[in-house]
Image (spheres, rainbow, N blue to C red):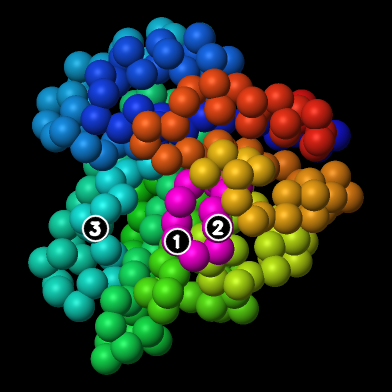
Amino acid sequence: MTKRTIIYSDLPLLNEDIMENIKQLMEHGADKIELMIDGEKWNDMEMLFEKIATQLKDLPVSFTIHPPAWDINLTSENKAIREASFHEYKKAIKFAGMIGASHVVIHPGFCFSPVFNKELAQQRAKAYMNQLCEIAKPLGVRLAIENVGYNGSAILTEEEFVEFLEDVDETAGYLIDIGHAQLDGWNVPNVIKIIKDRLIALHIHDNMAASDDHLPIGEGKMDWQAIMDVLNQEEIDCELILEYAPGTSLEALRTGKNYLEQNVFVG
């Protein structure tokens, strides 16, 4: 039987107290939480990991991990930035292992100038994916490779994304960010069908088809019925992660969870 879990990202509470954030999310119906380990409260990660790992494992919720998102780029033209980005992902994977997190989100990288070679960026990304799989596999942690970038900064087209993991260890699977896909003009239901056997999760949020707004479901231009239809038609075991913008009311997460429970099988 198909099983799906609804997860709350703590992105709406970015830069607030970590443990208090988790408490608030639990109060608003969270059973599983995606920790965005970015912002000032995660500044001293190495010391923080040891401090809070035991606390997190004692809570009646489970976790996924989203490494720092704004300042790292595995396919940067600058070698030092590539290596620092890899180091941050490596730390996030080890932390995931410490707290029993089911997966870590991985951004394959960005290409911010048409002067840069996207084929070379893809080769760099693939090499890093293989190295990260070697770290994650012994820890029992999956890697969820996300489609990132829009307005020309994505290193993978729709067609390239669905083929990207063909020669990568099964430790890695796909995470489709629905909002990013809309900005890049992807046929989201079709992509879900193609990669359903390696689909780990969906990042669920809406936008007005112009910028990465991370709006609650129904507040943008996304065709949610088409996405719900394909999820109901296909036997897909994937997690549904509500990833709303910083400052979004936590009641919007509860509303989003109710929408998903009413419109797609969750078990």
Q: Name the residue at the right extreme.
A: 233
At 50% from the left edge and 9% from the top edge, which residue is drawn? Answer: 27
* Label of residue 211 in the image: 1
Q: Are marks 1 and 3 in contact (CB under 8 Å)?
A: no
Q: Is residue 86 left or right of residue 167?
A: left
The residue tagged with tag 1: helix, strand or loop?
loop
Magenta span main SS = loop
Position of residue 174 in the picture relative to residue 190 (left or right): left
Q: Which quadrant, please, contains the C terminus?
A: top right
Q: Quadrant of the N terminus?
A: top right
Q: Earlier in the sequence, mark 1 or mark 3?
A: 3
Residue 198 appears in the figure = no
For the record, the magenta segment spans 201-214
Task: Identify the element where label 2 is drawn.
Answer: loop
Mark 2 to mark 1 CA distance (whole Å): 7 Å
| Circle 3 residue | 72
Residue 208, numbered label: 2
Query: Is 209 one of the magenta-colored residues?
Result: yes
Give me the residue at 47% from left, 26% from top: 249
Q: Neighbour class for label 1 at 10 Å: few (<14), some, many (≥20)?
A: few
Q: Nearer the viewer, residue 28 or 162?
A: 28
User: In this rendering, would 186 be left or right of 54?
Assistant: right
Q: Position of residue 110 (x, y in %)?
A: 34, 70
Give how far across and how far down residue 167 sits, in percent: 54, 71
